[in-house]
Amino acid sequence: MKNLVVSLLVVTGVFLMPSLLGAANKPKPADSPIYVITNDDGTLHSYGSFYQAAGTQEAPTLTYLQSVNTHGFGIGGGFFGMPRVAMVPSSSAQCVYISDASSGDIAAIDIQSQQLVGNFSGSMNDNGTSNGIGMVMNQNYLYAGYSLSNTIATFSVGAGCQLSFLGDITVTPLNGGWVAGMALNGNILVVTYIDGSIQSFNTANGIPISNNDEQNASGFASAFFPDGVDVTQDGHFAIFADAAVPTTVEVSDLSSGKLGPTVQYLVSNTTNVIGPGVNSATVRLSPDQSLLYIGNSQSGTVTAAFFNKNTGAVTPGCSSQQLKNFYNPWSYIGGLATRDTTGTGNVLYVAEFGSSIGILTVGPMGCTLTESAASPVTDELSPGLLSIQVYPPRPF
Amino acid sequence: MRAIVKSTVLFVMAVFAVASASAQQQICPPRPPAGTLIVNPLDLFSQNGVLNVDLTLQNQMGSDGFEHYCYVYMYQGQQVEAPTLRLNPGDRLELNLTNNIQAPYGLYSQKHQMHMSMFQPGRPGAKPTDDCNGGQILPSTTNVHFHGLNVPPICHQDDVIYTLIQSGDPPFEYNVQIPPNDNPGMYWYHPHAHGQATTQVDGGAAGAIFIEGTIPGTQGLPERVFVIRQQFRNPNSWLPGPNQLTVNFQPAIFPNSPSPFINVQYNQPEFWRIANSTTQAFLTLQLQFTSGLQQLEIVALDGVPLQNPIYTNEIDLPPAGRVEFITPGLPNNQEGAFSTLGFDTGPVGNPNPPQQLWKIFGTDDPKLKVRPAPAPTKPPADRQRFAGLLTQQPTTTRSLFFSEQTVGSNGPTQYFITVNGQKPHVFHMDDPPAIVTNTGAVEDWTIENRSGEAHDFHIHQLHFLLMAINGVPVQNPELYDSFTIPNWSGSGPFPSITVRMDFRDPNIAGTFVYHCHILDHEDGGMMAKIQVNPSNQR
């Protein structure tokens, strides 16, 4: 009994102490749950797993809730920068969509009930069995990029998480690549082809129409190829993560409605960048767009670079230590998602290829990325976790 | 004319005697167990200017759990694996290769086939029935590259682009004319069918070639030939899988098993000739006696005698590299060990851990003596190949770079070697040449490494003169056919080498390849073609 009392006091202390330290440390109210949702991508059975985020900024926790069987099949891997969990970028989101790369369908799950609503497919041509099916969406449409068929399917979003297939377009990467990274803002869809080429589309009428801006990114000449992509809230800039040595991103001005030539940024804060950043394949802006989180897939680290949302300039920030259990048993960093919908996001979740979720605290002052004591959390049903999302999502 | 087999056959026959009982079942000869005596491979010598050899390449899952790809030579009714081919400058090698590769091919995956054409169209103007006319590359397809020999890239000699030998084809006749002015030294042969080289070489398909000749300081010394190979349980695993080095097919896996060993005469210097026939192991070699680290006298690199010996106690030997050196004599009552110290290939490179390769024990028993290197039967040519290259004025300079991309967990990693200004491109068999030049040209190439792991530059048909490393001129340039470029650290200039290519010999005309000799990289597309036109076809 004595021990229990001590434990309760400690637990209570954990929750009381942060309140004295400022708003950033407030525990999340119990009536607004934050879910971390994964695409488990299992080859025999695939699931969307739900975790509840709690704790403080310094000591974030992640508690497993349940896994929803998608009734489809995954492939246990794929492109690092391909988003394979999608929801409307709004706190009003009710549905999360998880792609089943092997069975070729998209599973719709009701977020509140955590129940499968249905499975939706595009055309017979759509095939993502090589490296996955990426998805991005807004209130009206969901766009699914199929890695093997190089097609982008458009679905209209209906009530009750329903999707209706509208049609396909076929993309033609400049150098023989495949559709990989995807980002959507307003009426502009931006994609990467992991062969150095990138392209944007106008989605005003639903089915994407090329903006005739397909081009090789600046890093192409050195074989730095964009993989993941994100777009600023105002749609001014597209930011591409180069699968390259060292941590490298490229920024394109989208303000004309087309992709401009990319500007390449090496974003290390150390003289020897090889340690913290190898193969920077995934990228995610913080909610306030002050930081750019970059997943260094082959060094097991995450970099936070400073981002100027007015100019698109990227400057070196900080990098995490190599995350726990890198190469034993997990082996690549995949997608990133922030816990909170404001500020820096405060806590960053990291998809770790090999069945775990890394948890990083973003320092409230300046730039630090510190792996939490509770990290990593096992995502038991995923043979190769690459995609992750948070509800409520970042609002863009 | 059949090859003449000399003294080492007794050793070899002893090692493989066990094979006789089960020869009916054996597709590949049994390999020696760990912890036993290392013997030189069987020597086959040319006679009257010709070495005629029949080899069959076949495969079998070994009892050791590794897939074996064996070059089988039949000698007195016994299978012998991967004999050493010994020729003089000016000799002709008549090698009849039978491809008997059968499914299953081991743990071969299709990863490289995802992104490359595995069909090589025929040579321009060739008929479908012509030899060396391309075709489909299957897991059972093979050919032979005579690594380091400065011979023409043409059909029946050293062509790896159009020469594709299918399983079940009639024996393919290689008819390789060794240049009379070629350098005496160590070369090697191995399969080079694009996309299949890793699997076949990992399986052990490699053997030594010697161009006989006098290398100063080595006359009369006991000669030992070591072919270091590497075998993987899964040669195509994305993450480094269980693998081991072997020495003349004997596992070097100390301390899991006793090291292989040799017996040397006390106080007798020896002449060691080592080929790194691994698919991806960078070796850093050291000789240790009880009394301490030993100085080695390197007399030849990549088959080319050095102008001046290099004295060192550490030798870096990249995949495909060869080194020939004189060891000091083992003092009385001491023993020794020859090891690789390991090599850092960079943060995304494969591990190259330290490993003891073999032990050295001393003896006074004259029965355990090994024979000296054979004396040359021909005088050396007046003027060696590549003579005077250092003082030549380059006619062209080029810049190339290695780079690679890992864009997802399923691969494939995309490997590139790119001429600056051209598009990075995963090599396809039907690619046009990335470089076109003419016989007579002398070119300086600077090759950078823009990736996070080391690469091993190799070009077919000729040696290059190493002129500079990272832009700093090399004090005593030497000839190589393979050279390491370390990984880029992520900041500062890209590591680079500058090499001088010699296209002056008219026999170089043709189309051939350059690539990274980490064979998984080569199979993955880190390769390109160069076309050398006769100078009258500019």
Image (spheres, rainbow, N blue to C red):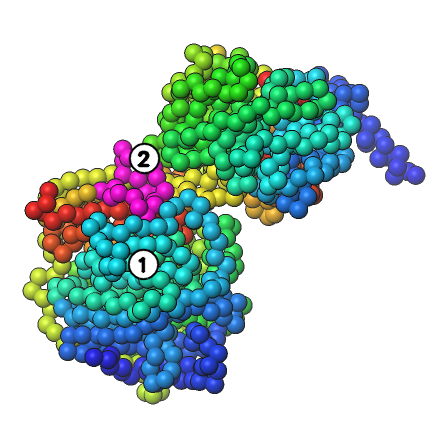
Tag of residue B423 = 2
Q: Is residue A99 left or right of residue B388?
A: right
Residue A298 in the image, given as x and y percentages of width and height: 50, 40
Residue A341 in the image, given as x and y percentages of width and height: 65, 19
Residue type for callout 1: Leu
Main SS of residues in magenta: loop
User: In the image, what residue occupies the spot 31% across and 50% down?
Assistant: B120
Q: Nearer the viewer, mark 2 or mark 1?
A: 1
Q: Which residue is mark 1?
A: B164
Residue B184 in the image, given as x and y percentages of width and height: 19, 66
Q: Nearer the viewer, residue A287 or B177?
A: B177
Chain holding disc 1: B
**Category of crowding for the residue at label 2, using alpha-carbon neighbours closer than 10 angstroms: few (below 14), some (14–19), many (at least 20):** some
Query: Does the magenta portion include B431?
Result: yes
Tag of residue B198 = none
User: In the image, what residue occupies the spot 35% across and 34% down?
Assistant: A222
User: In the image, what residue occupies the spot 38% across and 57% down?
Assistant: B197
Q: Nearer the viewer, residue A340 or B221?
A: A340
Q: Does B460 appear above or below A101? A: below
**Category of crowding for the residue at label 1, using alpha-carbon neighbours closer than 10 angstroms: few (below 14), some (14–19), many (at least 20):** many
Query: Does the magenta portion include B420?
Result: yes
Q: Nearer the viewer, residue A125 or B528?
A: A125
User: In the image, what residue occupies the spot 14% across and 47% down?
Assistant: B533
Which residues lie in the magenta part? B416-435
Question: N-terminal of the two: label 2 or label 1?
Answer: 1
Q: Does B211 appear above or below B392? A: below
For the residue labelled by badge 1, is the local secondary structure a helix, a strand or a loop?
Answer: loop
- Count of numbered badges drawn on the protein: 2
Chain holding disc 2: B
Q: Quadrant of residue B288?
A: bottom left
Quarter of the image with the C terminus of chain B is top left
Residue type for callout 2: Lys
